[in-house]
């Protein structure tokens, strides 16, 4: 399972993440992305959505270890 954060100071609401992982992300009333169900799509989809966010507003952590999965930590091997 992953923990997901969306920085609303960065999100420009283009819905790329909603299109990539519709089980996880949805727009709120301000047309910014929010997490509706962190387990709503496979983690790979969530990571793809984070990687494709044009303003890098999505952060993904491993909920068990707390390790940051995206963005990649400096020195982390891919
Ligand atoms: S892809 Fe990024 S900018 Fe676009 S709605 Fe999702 S979080 Fe916001």
Image (cartoon, rainbow, N blue to C red):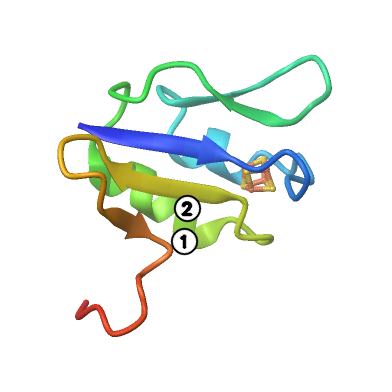
Quarter of the figure that contains the N terminus: top left
Q: Residues within 10 Å of mark 1 (few under 14, many from 20)?
A: some
Q: Is mark 2 within 8 Å of ligand 1?
A: no
Q: Check whether the beta carbons of the residues at disc 2 and disc 1 lie within 8 A of each other.
A: yes
Would you identify the image quadrant in which residue 16 lies? Answer: top right
Question: Quick one: which residue is furthest to the right in this view?
Answer: 30
Question: Quick one: which residue is furthest to the bottom in this view?
Answer: 75
- The front one of 68 and 22 is 68
Q: Give the residue drawn at x 72%, y 18%.
A: 28
Q: Give the residue drawn at x 39%, y 47%.
A: 60
Local secondary structure at mark 2? helix
Question: Quick one: which residue is furthest to the front in this view?
Answer: 66
Using the image, determine if residue 74 lies above or below residue 58.
Answer: below
Find ligand 1 in the image and state its quadrant.
Answer: top right
Horizontal side, residue 49 vs residue 7: left or right? left
Using the image, determine if residue 16 lies above or below residue 40.
Answer: below
Horizontal side, residue 25 vs residue 31: left or right? left
Where is residue 74 shown, x and y percent of the image?
Answer: 36, 80
Where is residue 53 shown, x and y percent of the image?
Answer: 59, 55
Q: Which residue is mark 2?
A: 50
Quarter of the figure that contains the C terminus: bottom left
Horizontal side, residue 62 vs residue 10: left or right? left
The label number, if any, that marks residue 29 in the structure image: none
Using the image, determine if residue 23 lies above or below residue 55.
Answer: above
Where is residue 49 shown, x and y percent of the image?
Answer: 46, 49
Q: Give the residue drawn at x 39%, y 17%.
A: 37
Local secondary structure at mark 1? helix
Mark 2 to mark 1: distance in Å? 4 Å
Where is residue 71 shown, x and y percent of the image?
Answer: 43, 64
Q: Residues within 10 Å of mark 2 (few under 14, many from 20)?
A: many
Q: Give the residue drawn at x 79%, y 46%.
A: 12
């Amino acid at each position: 399972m992953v923990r997901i954060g969306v920085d609303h100071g960065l999100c420009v609401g283009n819905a790329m993440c909603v299109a990539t992982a519709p089980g996880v992300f949805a727009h709120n009333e301000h047309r910014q992305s929010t997490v509706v169900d962190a387990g709503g799509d496979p983690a790979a989809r969530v990571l793809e959505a984070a990687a494709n966010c044009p303003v890098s507003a999505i952060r993904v952590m491993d909920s068990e270890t707390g390790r940051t999965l995206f963005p990649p930590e400096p020195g982390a091997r891919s």
